Image (cartoon, coloured by chain):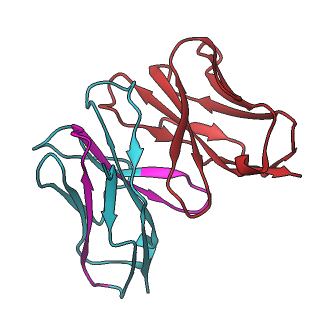
Chain colours: A red, B cyan
């Protein structure tokens, strides 16, 4: 059973601070890694994807991938109240026909 | 460009009733997916269609059937609804069925309650 694990939270973060979210996965064949944001009652929307070891930055978001340790993380810098949402980690592999395995999500609450 | 659309948005069924959830995308994507989302369990894949004319089971296919009507449309059918199928259902699509590098785009979801 391929698994993607995330802490469910809630992760409480003061406004302006850095939120750090972690995700571990069990399938060593995993090739691509996605972070989705989901507001309550809404559908998931992509924040970032990463497929090479190291860091990838996009605005206030940084994704970090370590395939040897099988984890991927997301940093949110200068957290804003609008960042309050559930963040879903998703993992795919080359034989998956585009299928994604999702973690249960981490709820982030940014407090003013 | 509407992206991925789903109908209906809300539905209440009685146990044993049947219904079809509709999904359409206008992005010319090859692959389409049906997920269900339950509290604390993330998104679980029900069925997917890698390309027009093909469908395959995902993680939780029992109690569901699908039809890939054409490249744009992918429907999910509940033949005899059960309370365990109360959930939020999301349809998604992506550009390629052979690569894991592509983003999946999600529809707005259907909130289904089975009493």
Residue, x 21% and y 58% (percent of image)?
A: B66
Asked which quadrant contains residue A96, the reply is top left
Residue A72 position within the rendered picture, expressed as x and y whole percent measured from the top left:
63, 25
- Residue B36 picture quarter: bottom left
**Relative vertical location of residue B40 with respect to residue A95 in this rendering, above or below:** below
- Check if residue B41 falls in the magenta segment: yes
A39 to the left or right of A109: left
B113 vs B97: above or below: below
For the question of whether residue A8 can be seen, the reply is no
Q: Nearer the viewer, residue A110 or A11?
A: A110
Between residue A56 and residue A34, name the one nearer to us: A56
**Residue at the extreme front:** B1
The magenta stretch spans which residues?
B16-44
Q: Residue at x 32, y 58 (%)?
A: B5
Q: Is residue B113 magenta?
A: no
State the image coordinates of residue A68 (x, y, percent, origin top left): 61, 12
Tell me what residue is drawn at x 87 percent, y 36 percent.
A17
Left or right: residue B111 versus residue A78 is left
- In the image, taking residue A112 as reference, residue B38 lies left or right, namely left
């Amino acid at each position: 059973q391929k698994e993607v694990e995330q802490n469910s939270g809630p992760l409480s973060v003061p406004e302006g601070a850095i939120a750090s979210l972690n995700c571990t996965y069990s399938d060593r064949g995993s090739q691509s890694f996605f972070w989705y944001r989901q507001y309550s009652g809404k559908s998931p929307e992509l924040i970032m994807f990463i497929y090479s070891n190291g860091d990838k930055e996009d605005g206030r978001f940084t994704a970090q991938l370590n395939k040897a340790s099988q984890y991927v993380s997301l940093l949110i810098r200068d957290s804003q109240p609008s960042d309050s949402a559930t963040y879903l980690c998703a993992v795919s592999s080359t034989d998956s026909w585009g299928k994604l395995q999702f973690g249960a999500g981490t709820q982030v609450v940014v407090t003013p | 460009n509407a992206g991925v659309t789903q109908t209906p948005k809300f539905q209440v069924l009685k146990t044993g009733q049947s219904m079809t959830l509709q999904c359409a995308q206008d992005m010319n994507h090859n692959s389409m997916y049906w997920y269900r989302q339950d509290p604390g369990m993330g998104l679980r894949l029900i069925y997917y269609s890698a390309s027009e004319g093909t469908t395959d089971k995902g993680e939780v296919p029992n109690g569901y059937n699908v039809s890939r009507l054409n490249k744009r449309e992918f429907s999910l059918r509940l033949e005899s609804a059960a309370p365990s199928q109360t959930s939020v259902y999301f349809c998604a699509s992506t550009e390629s069925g052979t690569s894991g590098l592509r983003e999946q785009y999600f529809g707005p979801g259907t909130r289904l309650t089975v009493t």
